[in-house]
Image: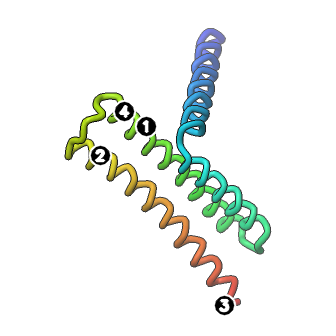
Amino acid sequence: MIGWLGSELRRFRNTVIWSWCGWRAAWASQKSLRQWTVANALSASLAFLLPLTAGERALILALGILVLAAELFNTAIETAINYISEARHPRAAMAKDCGSAGVALTAIAAAVAWICLLWRLYAS
């Protein structure tokens, strides 16, 4: 049991280290990740300043994190495709465009949530 626990803790530690390395690499190379992070910081600050319920606040924070996750997935797709080949190919373009669309849809979901919450606050 102790051996298993130690193994799981090492695995968790490695996961944290690799995730941090991925974040740092994306942060260093992707302006859009830095922009979404600033947008998230502003969104989170506003979520804590406004009189939102715990569920509303959790929704805003979770959607912000999902936007960052989508941006990281998009970065991974683009990096892998560029590693394979710099040549333009319709399938590579489609993969990159789909990754970008995923970021856009996630950001739209966050915007819709904000619009609904602000509408409720304005109407009451």
Q: Amino acid at mark 2?
A: Ala
In the depicted structure, whether residue 62 falls above or below residue 33 = below
Mark 4 is surrounded, within 10 Å at the Cα level, by few (under 14), some (14 to 19) or many (20 or more) other residues, namely few
Q: Amino acid at mark 1?
A: Ala
Q: Earlier in the sequence, mark 3 or mark 2?
A: 2
Check contact, mark 4 vs mark 1: CB within 8 A: yes
Spatial CA span between label 3 and label 4:
47 Å
Q: Which residue extends farthest left? A: 90
Q: Secondary structure at mark 2?
A: helix
Image x and y of residue 75, in percent:
45, 41
Q: Measure how far apart labels 4 and 1 are at the Cα level.
A: 6 Å
Q: Quadrant of residue 4?
A: top right
Residue sitting at the far top: 3
Tell me what residue is drawn at x 62 percent, y 28 percent.
Answer: 16
Read off the residue under disc 4. Answer: 80
Circles 2 and 4: CB distance less than 8 Å? no
Cα distance in 3D space between marks 1 and 2: 11 Å
Q: Nearer the viewer, mark 1 or mark 3?
A: 1
In primary-sequence order, the first of circles 1 and 2 is 1
Distance (Cα) linking label 2 and label 4: 10 Å
In this picture the colour scheme is rainbow
Q: Which residue is mark 3?
A: 123
Which residue in the protein does label 1 denote?
76
Residue 38, image x, y percentages: 66, 55
Tell me where residue 104 appears, x and y as whole percent.
44, 60
